[in-house]
Amino acid sequence: MGQLMQNYIEDAEKALLHTYNRYQIVLDKGEGVYLYDFEGKKYLDFVAGIAVFALGYGNQEYNDTLKGQIDKLLHTSNYYYNVPAIEAAKRIKKLSGMDRVFFTNSGAEAIEGAIKAARKYAFLKDGTADHEIIAMNHSFHGRTMGALSVTGNPHYREAFEPGIGNIRFADYNDFDSVLAQVTDKTCAIIMETVQGEGGLTPATEDFLKKVRALCDEKDILLILDEIQCGMGRTGYNFAWQKYGVKPDIMTSAKALGCGVPVGAFMMTEKVGQNSLVAGDHGTTYGGNPLACAAVNKVLEIFERDDIAGHVQEVGPYLWEKLDELMAKHSKIKEHRGAGLMQGLVFEEPVAPVINKALENGLILINAGANILRFVPPLVIEKADIDEMVAILDKCID
Ligand SMILES: *Cc1c(COP(=O)(O)O)cnc(C)c1O
């Protein structure tokens, strides 16, 4: 590493709070599916800022839209209407089939809103406020206190207890374990349609359908977290669309803005008419014109260029190539995921593989200590997958 990059890293370690064990590169710019560090070294990017940069780097149409909006109007309060937010909400409704949209600044904040909407819905039904939410073990919903409280990783929660309270955990893809946690106080069941951080595990159709039926029977709200698995990543605009199961409340973020910090929670009309009202919830920045201009353009490109259709083409190819890799390396025990959200489970920590890949110009990330996660830009081509596999193959032993 050169002196300039070394200096930046030393400055970072003195100034930034140590909440991340960062890889030893300072990234400088991006182009298509490639990133460049400060010394001009080129990396093939199979992380996309963790499932964010779906369109790749430097999409001119997207960049021009943002630049135009910056010159026009960057921010205005949610007490006024703005056109990008209206247009973006209309597009979300069309692509998701949900009815009401609330824009946030992040994924965790979308989860907070979803929890509040569910609790308010239950409160309006019986006038009591001690309702329970069932969440899944191995889930990840974010780092704020509410989102953390429904995150099924005790290690993340331990130092910050008590959380928001009245949360019960069940096992993902185990309907009986969900049933065992239901009480007459249950107001919502929250889960990722495909678990991301927890290990790239898709919900089984049987599980999701049974949970949906349970929710219908008991008027429990189903909250599907599509922050990582939504926005085309599994080959559908939103992952649940494959199952024919619709949530009452859904969250989105990550690729929703393709690099501009934005999230959203959406709900059906039934929940919209019977939960949050004026004065119940708000945000200063959430859904500002810049963020919504990004969302609107991203969704326009997704629809026009059929990004989800492209994922249906290249996703199986990635699956095939990673299967071949698994057959070749006995350290790889399992292959999981859906679309362009896949994971290889190793019998040992994958950090050395990731570091070796970085040396060789490939950016990869883990999900838990032993799983190598693949969440590339959705615009990758088969040739990019070939290039990735060729590099990774050399880095495993
Ligand atoms: C990343 C993620 C979140 C949290 O989003 P932030 O924008 O980091 O707050 C929540 N749920 C899932 C499934 C995620 O992958």
Image: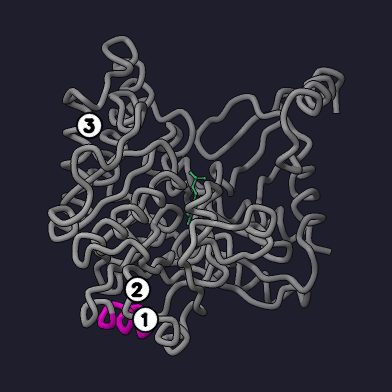
190 sits left or right of 15 in the view: left
Marks 2 and 1 close (CB-CB < 8 Å): yes
Hey, which residue is sitting farthest bottom in the picture?
176
User: Residue 209 sits in which quadrant?
Assistant: bottom left
- Residue at x-position 17% and y-position 33%: 86
Say which of marks 1 and 3 sits in front: 1
Secondary structure found at label 3: helix
Q: Residue 186 carries which label?
A: 2
- Report how far apart the C-alphas of labels 2 and 3 lie in the structure: 33 Å
86 sits left or right of 374 in the view: left
Asked if 70 appears above or below 190 in the picture, the reply is: above
Hey, which residue is sitting farthest front in the picture?
128
- Residue at x-position 35% and y-position 73%: 186
- Report how far apart the C-alphas of labels 2 and 1 lie in the structure: 5 Å
Mark 1 / mark 3, whichever is N-terminal: 3
Secondary structure found at label 1: loop
Say which of marks 2 and 3 sits in front: 2
Identify the residue under disc 3.
85
Q: Residue 183 carries which label?
A: 1
Q: Main secondary structure of the magenta part?
A: helix
Marks 1 and 3 close (CB-CB < 8 Å): no
Q: How crowded is mark 1: few (under 14 residues within 10 Å), some or many (20 or more)?
A: few
Could you tell me residue 102's position as x and y percent?
A: 27, 42
